[in-house]
Image (cartoon, grey):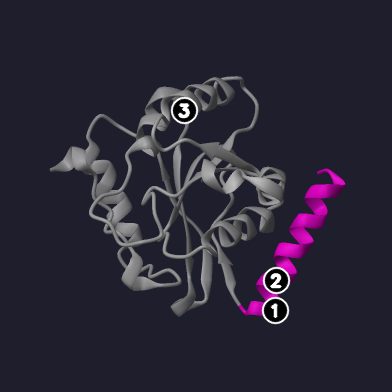
Amino acid sequence: MSQQRRVRRAVARTITRVMRYEMVGEVPPTGILVGAPHTSNWDFITMLLVMWHGGEHPRVLVKQQLFRGPLGWVIRGLGGVPLDRENPAGVVRELVDEARSGESFRLVVAAEGTRSRGTHWKSGFLRLSRETGLPVSLAFFDPPTRTMGFGPTFHASDDVRADMDVVRDFYADKLGIRPRNATPPLLREED
């Protein structure tokens, strides 16, 4: 493990201990990580803590508007990948190519797509899983139980409803930082 990763792991473990949170589950070796519920600007930091706690440095999809000025440099340094919400196909193609390279690949996705309550999640995490053959792992941060970490891992199938039933079952009792902002795990493809 590199010195930088050791420092990140030590920082994450210290912050977790000071906040009195329990880390649960194991960092998956590779794959697409769904971070939910996505209800606050703090979710980016909490997902980094979850990954760094296990000594890993993920890539994180972040809306491209946040990459302006000095903040962009910081977000890139933390693993941020700019996502153009109007035309995500180009970024997705690049990520698929990177995932297929054979190197360890971990991408954190906020499938809700926004910190505000919406009607549907974005289905990109399932498409990426199907296109790359990489598993989907469910990650969370739940202040009421003071836990964070990882839940089940699965490979996306052609049965979207069955895949989303796994997601719904896991996140049913996870509230996030601002529970009223959570979008229920439902895809437009299920309607």
Amino acid type at circle 1 is Val
107 relative to 172 in the view: left or right: right
**Between marks 1 and 2, how big is the CA–CA gap?**
5 Å
Label disc, if present, on residue 92 of the rendered structure: 3
Residue 83 percent location from the top left of the image: 50, 37
Secondary element under disc 2, as helix, strand or loop, is helix
Mark 1 vs 2: CB contact within 8 A: yes
**Residue 18's disc number:** 1
Q: Residue at x 71, y 50 (%)?
A: 70
Which circle's residue, 2 or 3, is located before the other in the chain?
2
Q: Quadrant of the C terminus?
A: top left
Do the residues under discs 2 and 3 have CB atoms within 8 angstroms?
no
Identified by mark 3, the residue type is Val
169, above or below 109, in the image = below
Residue 107 falls in which quadrant of the image? top right
Please tell me whether mark 1 sits on a helix, a strand or a loop: helix
Residue 15 is marked as 2
Which kind of residue does numbered mark 2 sit on?
Ile
Whether residue 171 appears in magenta in the rendering, the answer is no
Q: Residue at x 25, y 29 (%)?
A: 158
| Disc 3 to disc 1: CB gap under 8 Å | no
Which residue is outermost to the right? Answer: 3
